[in-house]
Image (spheres, rainbow, N blue to C red):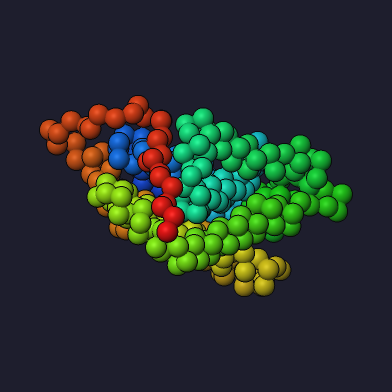
């Protein structure tokens, strides 16, 4: 890489690390403490997404800054294994959390009769355990050296998944950990759109049950649009990196790889800004944490860590 490119990349990694740690930490605390958001089952998965971004910002980005500053890996073999483990693991956690959010939104709209049975505290906890376990379990083969290995690529001075005995799980992990979740999310949002378009009468009947029910439906609709926005920005951040790795796999234009990498790092930083800019509930949650001078005590509600889905009634048949 040209030296000015590596310096700019290191500076970006440091800036993103600081913003990402602060932004995602505030997000996690705000969501745990703000009662009106804790009653949404979606909030648990948003916290999962924020925690994965927090880990990426706190671990991977500082290590990345060191790599670009030194133009070499100087942090030893153990961290060289931890770096790709956390990088690929957290990308998988982010995507699977978004899958869980999308499925949650779809069930809320298409099967409200079973929503409350699925999204209990126990059910949500099991889903979160599955998301994190599966994301990192996929990396066990290269971690233990059964299929590929985790190590240093001298050409890019980056720690990544390498071939072992001529074999690497990189393509398999790309399909299972990135492509399949993206397809599931895309299809789910198409189904949500189709369902909303074709069952508008049912939705209106449900909203007409009362002002409270109508308000909840409007709130859920806004939350669905917010989660779609998060997914689209995630794709915008990661697609350039995926395309560059395919189109220029021999790194003939190294600056493209650096620019694409910087965009990918931005995915761990941008979400808190999207939450604050597009959703009033999230803005209120941030204000509750950041406005320390306020004398207003927090609204009584369930203990932090407990997520209660708003009760959903089955739409009236017409």
- Work out whether residue 278 can be spotted: yes
Horizontally, residue 271 falls left or right of residue 173, namely left
Q: State the image coordinates of residue 56 (x, y, percent, origin top left).
A: 51, 45
Q: State the image coordinates of residue 104 (x, y, percent, origin top left).
A: 49, 48
The one nearer the camera, 125 or 72, is 125
The one nearer the camera, 106 or 228, is 106
Q: Which residue is at 36% across, 38% downward?
A: 39
When the figure is inspected, residue 83 is found, relative to residue 71, above or below; the finding is above
Q: State the image coordinates of residue 59 (x, y, percent, origin top left).
A: 51, 41
Q: State the image coordinates of residue 170 (x, y, percent, origin top left).
A: 73, 54
Farthest-out residue, left:
295
The one nearer the camera, 155 or 288, is 288
Q: Which residue is at 23% across, 32% downward?
A: 299
Horizontally, residue 87 falls left or right of residue 197, namely right
Horizontally, residue 285 falls left or right of residue 235, namely left
Farthest-out residue, front:
318
Farthest-out residue, right:
165
- Work out whether residue 48 can be spotted: no
Numbered disc total: 0
């Amino acid at each position: 890489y040209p030296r000015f490119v590596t310096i700019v990349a290191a500076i970006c990694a440091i800036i993103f690390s600081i913003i990402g740690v602060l932004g995602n930490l505030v997000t996690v605390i705000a969501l745990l403490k703000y009662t009106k958001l804790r009653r949404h089952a979606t909030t648990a998965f948003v916290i999962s997404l924020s925690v994965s971004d927090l880990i990426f910002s706190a671990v991977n980005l500082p290590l990345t800054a060191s790599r670009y500053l030194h133009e070499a890996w100087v942090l030893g073999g153990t961290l060289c294994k931890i770096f790709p483990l956390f990088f690929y693991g957290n990308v998988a956690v982010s995507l699977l959390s978004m899958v869980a959010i999308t499925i949650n939104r779809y069930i809320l709209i298409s099967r409200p009769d079973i929503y409350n049975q699925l999204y209990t505290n126990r059910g949500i906890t099991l889903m979160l355990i599955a998301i994190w376990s599966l994301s990192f379990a996929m990396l066990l083969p290269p971690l233990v050296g059964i299929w590929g290995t985790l190590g240093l690529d001298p050409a890019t001075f980056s720690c990544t998944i390498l071939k072992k005995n001529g074999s690497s799980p990189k393509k398999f992990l790309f399909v299972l950990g990135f492509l399949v979740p993206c397809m599931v999310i895309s299809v789910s949002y198409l189904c949500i759109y189709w369902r909303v378009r074709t069952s508008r009468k049912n939705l209106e009947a449900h909203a007409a049950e009362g002002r409270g029910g109508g308000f909840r439906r409007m709130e859920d609709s806004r939350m669905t649009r917010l989660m779609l926005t998060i997914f689209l920005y995630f794709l915008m951040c990661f697609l350039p990196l995926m395309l560059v790795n395919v189109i220029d796999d021999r790194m003939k234009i190294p600056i493209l790889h650096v620019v694409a990498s910087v965009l990918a790092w931005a995915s761990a930083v941008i979400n808190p800004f999207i939450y604050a800019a597009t959703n009033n509930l999230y803005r209120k949650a941030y204000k509750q944490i950041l406005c320390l001078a306020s004398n207003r005590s927090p609204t009584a509600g369930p203990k932090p860590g407990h997520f209660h889905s708003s009760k959903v009634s089955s739409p009236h048949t017409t």
